[in-house]
Image (cartoon, rainbow, N blue to C red):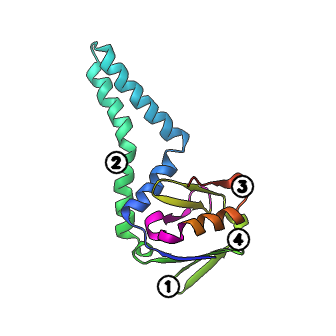
Amino acid sequence: MVETDIKLTVGDLYDYNLRHSYTQIPTLLATIAGIAGIAVGIYWRQQYWLMMVIIGALLVFYMPITLLVKTSQTMALSPAMKNPVHYLLNEDGITVSQGEQSQTLPWSGVHKAVSTGRSIILYTSKNSASVFPRKQVGESLPLLIQTISANLDPKRNKIKQ
């Protein structure tokens, strides 16, 4: 059993948004096209080389900059982001509490678990997740990973320690 309170920061949410976006095919294709545009522009050095470099740079840097702006707006405008969320993970599932509201999700409802260098992420649907920043979880991190691994189907557990 793991019990922790999490208050996401802009950096924590940005980390999740980057990981989520860069595992999507359109974002990957745009980034590859941008890198190709920059490479062609640099090595081609013909009439439109500068335009190729500029378009390539726009494709490469558009998503991270847009995600940072949207993440900052979400943190500033969402009342739910201003208060910590209490998590209880045990063999029954994940109980999420904030204020007077509480909800339990069984482990069968967790789509997958992934990790980044900064966080452990439990996807509760295709586009939403519970984010556990490693710094906030602190000394409970090994127990958190152990609890997830013990209760989640190994095919859906992609956590790298």
* Residue under pointer 4: 106
Q: Residue 61: which quarter of the image?
A: top left
Q: Secondary structure at mark 4?
A: loop
Tell me: 108 left or right of 24: right
Reply above or below: 84 against 117. below
- What's the mark number on residue 154? 3
Q: CA distance from mark 1 to mark 4?
A: 21 Å
Q: Is residue 139 magenta?
A: yes
* Residue under pointer 2: 65
Q: Secondary structure at mark 3?
A: helix
Q: CA distance from mark 2 to mark 1?
A: 33 Å
Depth check, mark 1 against mark 4: the one in front is 4
Span colored in magenta = 125-141
First in residue order: circle 1 vs circle 4: 1
- What's the mark number on residue 58? none
Q: Nearer the viewer, residue 153 or 149?
A: 149
Reply above or below: 72 against 3. above
First in residue order: circle 4 vs circle 2: 2
Name the residue type under label 1.
Gly
First in residue order: circle 3 vs circle 2: 2
First in residue order: circle 3 vs circle 4: 4
Cβ atoms under marks 2 and 1 closer than 8 Å = no
Quarter of the image with the C terminus is bottom right
Tell me: 47 left or right of 158: left
* Residue under pointer 1: 99
Q: Is residue 1 magenta?
A: no
Q: Position of residue 139 (x, y in %)?
A: 50, 70
| Residue at the spot 54% in from the left edge and 55% down from the top edge | 115
Q: Residue 38: which quarter of the image?
A: top left
First in residue order: circle 1 vs circle 3: 1
Depth check, mark 3 against mark 2: the one in front is 3
